[in-house]
Image (cartoon, helix red, strand yellow):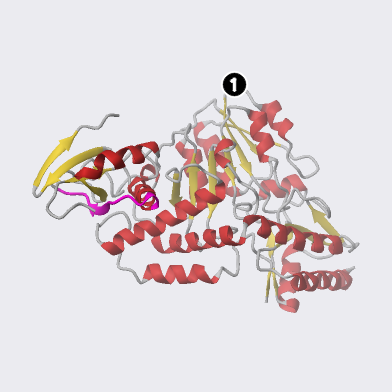
Amino acid sequence: MIYFDNGATSFPKPAQVGTAIMAALAAPASPGRSGHAPAMAAGRTIHRARKALAKLFGLKENGRICFGPNITWALNLALMGLSLEKGQHVLSGSLEHNSTARPLAKLKAEKGLDWEIVPARQGQLWAEDFAKLIRPETKLVVLNHASNVSGALAPARAIKKAIGQVPLLLDTAQTAGSVDLDEAGSWVDLLAFTGHKGLLGPTGTGGLWVGPNINLRPCLVGGSGSRSESLEHPDFLPDALEAGTANTHGLAGLAAGVEYILQVGRESIRAHELSLTQDFLKEIIKIDELTLLGPGPGQSERVATVSINLKGWSSSDLAGALERDYGILTRAGLHCAPLSHQALGTFPGGSVRFSFGPFNKPEEIKIGVKALKSLARQKG
Amino acid sequence: MPALGGAEIILIFPSNTDILNAEDLLEEKGLPFILVPVPKEVNPNCGLAISLAENDHDLILPVLEAAGLRPSAAYRRQGDDFSCLHLDH
C-alpha cells in the first residue's frame, strides 16, 4: 500500500504516539478533577500538549489553547462564539472547506450575517483583494491557510497586514505541523487546528487558540474542575471553552505527535514534503491528458497536496483504479470543499487528490507517477 | 516543601492550567513546593493548589506573579486552622 491521503489524516503516526495513548489508557485518572497522583499525571499529560503546541506556534502563553474533538468544533466555536449579528460583515476566501462555509451559510440564513467571498485569481488568494472589501461593519476575516483541494497556500501574514484591526480566523487544517506559523499571536487572532493531520496525533483531537483581544461566548457549559461552587461556568481560559472531561488519551497522543515534530524540526518536514511534491509535479505535468489544479512545478506557495484530473476518467474511477491496480490510496470527489471546486472550475465532478506526508518516500512518488502515466494511456 | 509541622501557605489559582504552569516554573527555578488537592475547608474547587513553606512565600510569590501567574486566593494553614491572606493585585 502507498498512502497518499495525508490531507485526510496523516499515516503512519510516529511510534511514540501509540505508546503515549496506551500509557494514558492504562492510567486510572480523569484530568483536572481528582487530586490523586494519576489524576495529576493526566492533567500534566494534557498540559504537555498545550506546551508543545505553544512552542510550535510560537505563542507566549499556553493557557489560551482550548482543546476539543476536532477543527470543525474549533471553527464553529469561533464563528458561533463571536455572536455575529444581522448587518455585520464577514469575509472569507473562496477556497474554504465546508467546516467554515457551512457555519457561515448557517449564520447568513439564520442571523442575516453579510458573508462575502473573496474570489481567487489564478487559483490563489491575494491580500489586496481582501483589503478592498473591508468595510466599517466587517467583524471577521476567515481564511483557509491552504486549500485542501489544490494545495495553494494563502498569504496569511500579508492578508492580516492588509485587513488591519479586523480579526483573522485561520483554519490551519492543512498547514499546522509543516508550514511556518511562528509567532502566530502577532498575526492571527483565532487559530483553529486539527490534531490528526500534520500534527501527527490521533483523530478526536483539535483545538482553538484564542487571541487576547477576542472574547468568545461558550457553546457548551458544564463541568470544568474549577469554581465548582458556582452554577456559572468559569469565564477564564481554557476552562471557559473546555466544558466536560477532556480526551486525555487522544491528547496524550497529540502531545507525542507535536513533540516529535519539535524534535525532528518543522522546517525539515516542510522541506521533505515540498521536495516530494516538486518531484511529483515535474513528472506529471508532462502527461498530456492530465489537468493540474493549483500551483505547478517550481511554485513554493503550496502545501504537499496535489489535485488532478485525467482525460477520460471520472475522479472516482481514477482513484478506484489507483487503489485496485497499484495499491495507491488517494481521495476523489469534492473533498468537502464545493466552494473550492467552484472556484477552480471542477464542480461537481471534483478531482483526485494526492497528499503527501512526512513518511512518504521518493520511491513512492515514482510509483505514483508511473501509475498516472499508464492510466492516462489507457483512455488517452 | 513545607517543613513538617510548620505553617504552610496554600495558593489557589483560577485554572488547572495555571497550576501546571506554576509547577513547571517552580521546578525550573528549583524552588520548593508541593501540589496538593485544594483544601475543602476553604475552597470547594475540585482542582489542585500549590503548598509552600511559610518562610518561602515571600520569595516564591513574586516569581509566580512575574510570570503572570496570579493566585486567586491564598491561605495560611497551621494544622487544621486556615486564615485568608490578602493579595496585592
**Residue depicted at x 74% and y 72%:** A364
Location of residue A358 with respect to A132 vertically, above or below: below
Disc 1 element:
loop
Position of the N terminus of chain A, as image quadrant, is bottom right
Q: Position of residue A66 (x, y in %)?
A: 44, 47
* Residue B83: quadrant of the picture: top left
Q: Left of B58 or right of it: where is A338?
A: right
Q: Position of residue A7 (x, y in %)?
A: 64, 59
Q: Left of B57 or right of it: where is A148?
A: right
Give the residues in magenta.
Answer: B28-40
Location of residue A375 with respect to A183 vertically, above or below: below
* Residue B56: quadrant of the picture: top left
Q: Which residue is mark 1?
A: A136
Q: Position of residue A248 (x, y in %)?
A: 39, 60
**Residue depicted at x 69% and y 59%:** A333
| Amino acid on which disc 1 is placed | Pro
Q: Chain of mark 1?
A: A
Give A172 or B17, whichever is nearer the viewer: B17
Q: Position of residue A139 (x, y in %)?
A: 55, 29
